[in-house]
Image (cartoon, rainbow, N blue to C red):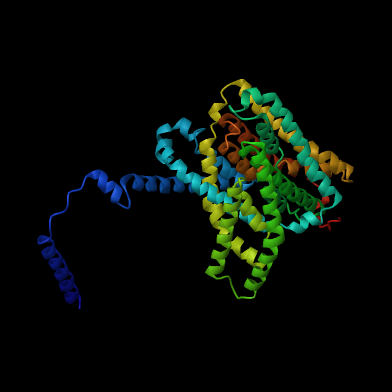
Amino acid sequence: MFVVYVLMVAASVGVFVLIDRFAPHPHVIADEAIAVTSGLAPNKINNLLHVLLALTVVLVAARVTGAIFSTIKQPVVIGEVLGGILLGPSLLGYLAPNLYASLLPSSVAPFLEVIAQLGVIFYMFLVGLEFDLKIVKKSGHTALAVSHMSIILPFLLGSFLALAIFDTACPPNIPFMNFALFLAISLSLTAFPVLARILTDQKMHRTKMGTIALTCAAVDDVTAWCLLAVIVSIAEAHHLSSAVTTVILTVAYICAMLTVVRPLMKKVVDWLESLDYLTESAHALFLVGLLLSSFATELIGIHAIFGAFLLGVVISHESLVAKELTRKIEHLVRVLFLPTFFAFTGMRTEIGLLSTPEDWLLCGVIIAVATAGKFCGTLFPARLSGLSWREASALGILMNTRGLVELIVLNLGLDMKIISPRLFAMLVLMALVTTVITPPLFHLMTWGHLWKEKHKFLT
């Protein structure tokens, strides 16, 4: 049998060699024509190689830095963000420019940007899937008062800060209103996912205190995203009439999603749950809906992430469909897409632009204003609502968490050229500092307290 196999292979090779001897001569085509007609031109091959290498480096760096931060009781996401910044010009590009140019050349930036944008769209869809609209409906007096004031105070402080730094920090040809609105909303955000992770790690997410914190952060998130949609629509419009049109279209789209798409989606979800499992066609249906919703908000002029978030919101977070979609999507998003977003953010964060003592002083002022605005905007209404000073202080510390949500907004502002790369670096540092200090301060504030007992949230 072995001999037969060898003879068969040898005969095949002999026939091919014979055919090759009688083959016609090749046509002579210029190299440029080959590059055009080839499906994989040399530069495309090089770009693919660079992108694959860059993604490999990004994933390894994210895993390593995330694991390090996890061991010191910090959110993994902060380690991944820091890993992305370390891969950028702030450290790797500064210490080893040749290595940086080899691992993350400028030619891969557009490809990483596309992957990062897709990652953020899928991430916001997941955030929407996990969001419970009932929380907003049943929010008590404490939650509403705290969440709204925790936005209003830092928003006003950010507006005053914008007035003070407009001449030195604002990019050219940007109206003061656009700059002030964006800086104000940047200081007003709370990262709901990171806050939830901190409470879960402390085993406090089911306590009265934890429920109030999660409710406040959820209402804060909805309010902040609505405000951001309006701000983006104003910034993108070149005339007042265009801004009004964009705002009207945005409101109309939100209403349509809640009043038309949500009941329709409930029927679709109920039908799919009657089946044994979600088919590939069902997954494709939701992905098409995700892309169309993102396309619609991008077309309106308020960015694709809002459409992704809205579609997630209108799907019941308690449904098996939502849980299955989350299970299928989240690992790829968290392991591949988000680290790519962090790396892309790191490539855009040039801490070296803060080259003078005045720059670092301004960065410190931004961190102080952001921290004071969130903490005081939470502390006093929480105290007036009946919480003790210690409970109100702990709540204020939690609401100061920013994390990934802040980075998404900052990248949006940089893309729209509302903020300069120098101010972008300062705000990224603000997001990192305010998030990193939250777990230890919260742990210190809750040390020895009986908040880990389960309480029913009273509305």
Quadrant position of the N terminus in the picture: bottom left
Asked whether residue 64 is in view, the answer is: no
**Residue at 11% across, 65% down:** 18
Please identify the quarter of the rendering in which residue 30 is found.
top left
Outermost front residue: 241
Image side of residue 337 versus residue 43, left or right: right
Q: Residue 257: x, y in percent?
A: 68, 57
**Residue at 66% across, 34% down:** 178
Image side of residue 283 versus residue 182, left or right: left
**Residue at 67% across, 66% down:** 264
Image side of residue 425 versus residue 88, left or right: right
**Residue at 67% across, 49% down:** 250
Total label count? 0
Outermost bottom residue: 1
Please identify the quarter of the rendering in which residue 170 is found.
top right
Q: Residue 409: x, y in percent?
A: 63, 41
Q: Is residue 94 above or below residue 82?
A: above
Asked whether residue 364 is in view, the answer is: yes
Q: Is residue 110 above or below residue 139?
A: above
Q: Residue 229: x, y in percent?
A: 67, 45
Is residue 311 or residue 211 the one in the foreground? 311
Quadrant position of the C terminus in the picture: bottom right
Is residue 84 or residue 366 the one in the foreground? 366
Q: Residue 101: x, y in percent?
A: 41, 36
Is residue 1 or residue 231 the one in the foreground? 231
